Image (cartoon, rainbow, N blue to C red):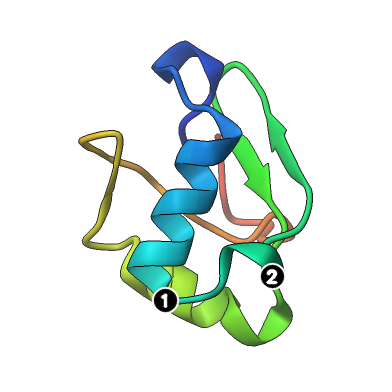
Amino acid sequence: MGAGRSAGVRPQDLVGAIASEADIPGRSIGAIEIGDHFSLVEVPESAVDQVLTVFKTSKLKGKKVRVRRADDPGGKD
């Protein structure tokens, strides 16, 4: 996710947004790493497409954020 510490993102913000927007249980969200300008969130492989689709139109902390797979070689954060 293209938001991190500098945007005030906390782990509970990420879990809450993903769980509510993508309709997946918060307990199925794995490790979270928050950097200065981006965050990495581990979600089940079966939920990846749902999370990517939902966050094309959803917001995190009131702001639109770019979301991509961590292994996407075309992404630049």
Residue 40 x/y as whole percent? 67, 44
User: Is 31 on the left-hand or right-hand side of 5?
Assistant: right
**Secondary structure beneath label 1:** loop
Whole-Å distance between the Cαs marked 2 and 1? 11 Å
How many C-alpha atoms fall within 10 Å of the one at disc 1: few (<14), some, or many (≥20)?
few
Q: Residue furthest right?
A: 31
Residue located at (50% from left, 45% from top): 14
Residue located at (25% from left, 57% from top): 58
Answer whether residue 1 is visible to the viewer in this image: no
Residue located at (59% from left, 36% from top): 11
Residue 68 x/y as whole percent? 53, 58
Please report whichever mark, 2 or 1, sits nearer to the chain's N-terminal start.
Answer: 1
Q: Residue furthest top?
A: 6
Numbered label tally: 2
Nearer to me, 59 or 25: 25
Above or below, 34 against 72 in this view is above
- Residue denoted by label 2: 28
Nearer to me, 31 or 40: 31
- Give the residue type that dot 2 points to: Ser
Residue 29 x/y as whole percent? 67, 62
- Residue denoted by label 1: 23
Quarter of the figure with the C terminus: top right
Above or below, 34 against 53 in this view is above
Residue located at (37% from left, 64% from top): 20
**Secondary structure beneath label 2:** helix
- Give the residue type that dot 1 points to: Asp
